[in-house]
Amino acid sequence: MIGRITNEMTSQMVLSGIQSDLDQLDTSQEELSTGLSINEPSDNPAGEGLALQLNTTLSDLTTYSNNVNDGTGWANAATSALSDMTSAVQTVQELVEEAANGTDTQSDMSAAADEVDQLIDQIKSDADTQYNGQYIFSGAATTTEPYQAGSDDTYAGDTGSVTREIAPGSSVTVNVNLSSVLGNGQTTSGSSAGDGLLLNTLRNIADDMQAGNSSALSGTDLTDLQSNLNSLVALSTSVGGTTDRLQMASTRIESLQNTTTDTLSNTEDADMAATETQFSSEQAAFEAALQSGADIVQESLMNFLGSSS
């Protein structure tokens, strides 16, 4: 049995319809305001879950990108320092070759020795290069100055690695072991004994120049210097390889960021043109519902007054 539709029931249905239209209008207005189609999880639970995953991925990619940029800074600083050291060693090589020919006076040899000492200080200064407040050639002891100024050539850092994570489970070592090339100088100042590495060789060269020992300069000194120079060049090549790997990582990360950002946009961004059209339609429907509701309520009121008279 169908009951009688009362004026109260009519009013409730009208108000319910108006409220429904208003809710749809509010939703479209919020999408226009935020530019997002998902403003709360209930709008699209599946889409919200995907958006959370994509935002997490973007956050991780940003971290990897920052690590790559930092590692690239380390590598660039190392490249510059090693290039300066190589130029200094090549200058010493020219001085040795000139002094070894036996035509230089002792005064010339002593002047060359003084220049070698200055170049040693320059090399040690380059070895103390910092990036972002950290010594890049001190191993993992990045707050320790690896080589102090003066005649003491002892390496003060360690042989630890400095790494940067550039992808899930993938890290790259951004530092190099410069002490394996420079060494610790002479065992005793003024004595040729030592580790045979670059600083030891350079000290020996300066001593032999001061002593006018051209035979040592043309023999052991020149041979050792060439060997040390080769090691220095190999170290520079290693840094170049690190730079290439970081560049490839940067390109890959940038591509992933673009792809992930596009996917996130497709997931949560509103179609503004479609939303504007929908908003206009909903606004017109809401206004029509208000007018219809007013007419219905007015008619119901008139019927009520008529029945009461």
Image (cartoon, grey):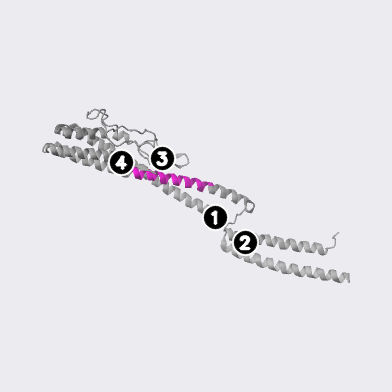
Between the C-alphas of marks 2 and 4, the distance is 62 Å
Residue wearing tag 1: 266
Name which quarter of the figure residue 98 lies in.
top left
Q: Earlier in the sequence, mark 2 or mark 4?
A: 2
Q: Which mark is nearer the camera, 3 or 1?
A: 3
**Magenta run includes residue 76:** yes
Q: Counting residues from the N terminus, which is met first, the one under dot 4 or under dot 3?
A: 4
Give the alpha-carbon distance from disc 4 to disc 1, as whole Å: 51 Å
Circle 4 residue: 126
Which numbered disc flags the more N-terminal residue, 4 or 1? 4
> Label 2: few (<14), some or many (≥20) within 10 Å?
some
Inter-mark Cα distance, 1 to 2: 19 Å
Instruction: Name the dominant secondary structure of the magenta segment.
Output: helix
Residue 245, position in %: x, y? Answer: 38, 44
Query: Helix, strand, or loop for circle 3?
Result: strand
Circle 4 Cα neighbour tier, 10 Å, few/some/many (<14 / 14–19 / ≥20) = many
| Residue beneath disc 2 | 29
How many labels were placed on the picture? 4
Residue at position x 25%, y 32% in the image: 200
- Which amino acid does the dot numbered 1 rest on? Asn
Residue under label 3? 172
Q: Secondary structure at mark 4?
A: helix
